[in-house]
Amino acid sequence: METYYVPDAVDFVFKEYQAEFSAQQSSQNTEAAKADPYYVDPLSGNKRRAFLMAIYLNIYRQFLGVNTLVAFAGQFVPSTSHISPYVDLILNSVQAVFTIVSTFWLGNMFGRRPLYLVSGVQLAICNILIMLGFLIKVPILAYVFMILYMALFGLFYAPVSWSYPAEIIPAANNTFATAFTWAALTLTTLIPPIVNEKVGSPYPLFAFFGVYTAISVVYMYTSMVESKGRKYFDIIR
Amino acid sequence: MALILAISSFEFGYALCEISTVPITKLMKYYDIHMDPGAANGLLVGIMPFGGIFGCIINRLFLYLFSRKYFITYRRNAHFAVASLNLLAAALVQINTIETIVIGRFVLGICCGLYTAIAPQYIKDIAPPALRPMLGSFISLGRVAGIVFCYALGVIFSQTGVRGYYRIIFAFPGGLAIFQSFLILFFVPDSPVEMLEKHKL
């Protein structure tokens, strides 16, 4: 892996960052910027938009519902079913296979924006159909679309999930934005088992995930900029 | 290097699922938990990402208080500190009380929060734009590998009837953190941006 894919041209990378770093230093004259050369004020112009987008995408990453499926899918399947001990393993193995495919192939073919939008539409539909499966008590419909959800997630969303927010904002702000993904993950892992037990079915969860994902697609369509092949300062401009 | 850093997200995926590999009723019995099973399940899984929030805040505080330059100078020491926290978390969950498993999972979450805030940024720093999509995907790849590995361990142990297998599953992240720290020590150099900031370039 390192032989073929990790860049050995360290000087080439250094030159790129040297230029970027110099441009950033010369573009900022505030006291904070002088104290910390890598400081970027998150609340001005396009930087603010990028910062808010990164926060939103960190929340979106969890409210897609994937980690609820990852952690609790086995509990959504009746324990009397002979497949129940293996549901989690099967679902996540499907996700793993398609994530490998996307890592080495699909993620390089398309830009971040198309992948976000296409995956958003697909996952919203899957969430709604999983919800319907549980609501009308046709479990096979829910199971089929849970597997399809994992495949589509791995194929279209996984390549951009963590990389895009890190590309559109600087390190210090990315740390802050990542806290929102953990806050959202806390909610999507704390609440589902309680809802599942109280309601007797997880359909309200998938209804929420489906609607949230659909609304997010509209927001991303209107506000997301492409970052593929571009450096931070090009994106901000 | 990206693969070594993907171990961080491997741990995140693993930590997310380790509770789900053991039936919640058994866990409640082992740890003497007296509450609604749904609430207990939500608490034991959800406390880990709650710790992740604090991991990110701690990371941001270090950057703010000591500046990125200072923090990065001691990055390797910081990794060993996080690995030690990981060991502490793994040790705490071995004690069968609800307090220790909740605190242990919370500490594990802090470690995962620290890792996940640093790793994508480091990969962005070292990768030229053409390779960023693939190397950035390694974070997702590591996460899902951790999930599959954790569930596979759970299925194997439960099907073979190993007694108290939850202890082995819960102890694993501690060993993994030590392994990663040694890999980082010997194989992962400072990123170009870090070297610029340290005026080594």
Image: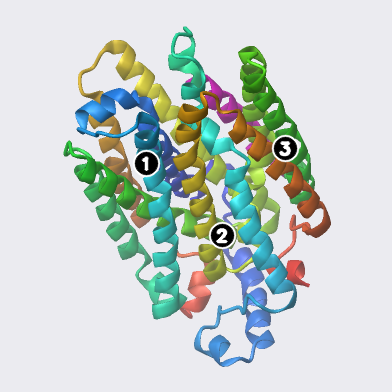
Instruction: Look at discs 1 and 2 and give the one toward the viewer.
Output: 1
- Where does the magenta region start and end? A88-107
Locate residue B64: give its quadrant: bottom left
Q: Judge by depth and name the residue closer to the eye, A228 or A70.
A: A70
Q: Residue at x 59, y 59 (%)?
A: B124
Chain label for disc 2: B
For mark 1, give the secondary structure.
helix
> Please, which residue is most extreme toward the right here?
A222
Circle 2 is placed at which residue position? Answer: B126
Residue at 20% from the left image edge and 43% from the top image edge: B91
Earlier-in-chain disc, 1 versus 2: 1
The residue depicted at 78 percent of the width and 57 percent of the height is A226
Secondary structure mostly seen in magenta is helix
The residue under label 1 is B43
Residue at 69% across, 57% down? B129
Q: Amino acid at mark 2?
A: Ile
